[in-house]
Amino acid sequence: MRKKIIAGNWKMHLNASQASLLLHRLHERIKIHRDIEVVLAPSSLVLQPLSLQIDRRKFRLAAQNAYHKDQGAYTGEVSFTMLQDLVHYAIIGHSERRIHFNEDLETVRDKVSASVRNGITPILCVGEKENERKAGETKIVIHDQLVTAVSNLTAQEVSNMVIAYEPVWAISTFGGELAKPDVVAKELVYIRKQIADLYGEKVSKQVRVLYGGSVDDQIVSGYLDLPDCNGVLVGGASLNYHKFSGIVDKAYTLNKKDDS
Ligand code: PEP
């Protein structure tokens, strides 16, 4: 069984001392679980200090974004190359970046390629907006986002990556309507089917697929129980150490149940 990933996206919250305090609290609450990977995505400003503080047996760090060129005259940007020694993962194509920063399909593809080129595992976010779901366009949106994003990758690179299905309408900052697990289940199957069509069944089984959208400790089990779900990407609730460590506890309990 692959490890479940519980990833927290802290978005543009927490300065260095606040981030350090939250990490400290999480460290006290979260035990080392062999079957669970806990990933924290703080602001890029605090990746460096947190990388010194972090217990690598318990946590992995992720970037929330980076620029697709490795270096050069790109004032204000941080490249994947610069993040190489700091992070294991990078969140790419998050809906807040697609919507607020106009990241299009090709930009996301270039970032995915840059991430892989620099040895950082992409957590690629895909998902439809509310109007797209209502118009029956969910599958075509996911298809276009997914197929474009992975178009420069080999089968081996795709099997190592992580895909997060995050319907925009379910993300807390865009409405936060709870997606029913049976609705999510269908899209997770669809995502794996797309990968199977492009890269074959083996890769489709290996690629890790997460769910994200207003997940907290009360509702996480409904998603973690889905057969195609390898974990969750958590925004708002990851800023609360009770809720986030509660999510990790739920994942641990479910894993133990599966093992018995
Ligand atoms: C996210 O930021 O990826 C996310 C899913 O946010 P939230 O859990 O707050 O909806």
Image: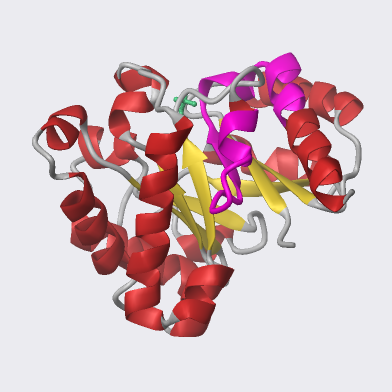
Give yes or no for residue 241 being in the magenta stretch. Answer: yes
Left or right: residue 189 versus residue 19 is left
Q: Give the residue drawn at x 55%, y 29%.
A: 10
x%, y% of residue 239? 62, 20
Q: Is residue 31 above or below residue 91?
A: above
Q: Number of numbered discs present?
A: 0
Q: Is residue 145 above or below residue 239?
A: below
Say which quadrant the N terminus sits in: bottom right
Residue 49 appears in which quarter of the rendering?
Answer: top right
174, 205: nearer the viewer: 205
16, 27: nearer the viewer: 27
39, 206: nearer the viewer: 206
Which color scheme did the rendering employ for the protein? secondary structure
Left or right: residue 80 versus residue 257 is left
Q: Give the residue drawn at x 36%, y 48%.
A: 187
Q: Is residue 234 above or below residue 112?
A: above
Q: Give the residue drawn at x 89%, y 48%.
A: 260
Q: Give the residue drawn at x 38%, y 26%.
A: 171
232, 55: nearer the viewer: 232
Left or right: residue 247 versus residue 249 is left
x%, y% of residue 144? 20, 60
**What stretch of residues is rendered in magenta?**
221-247
x%, y% of residue 60? 72, 49
x%, y% of residue 2? 71, 61
Give yes or no for residue 186 being in the magenta stretch. Answer: no
Q: Is residue 73 visible?
A: no
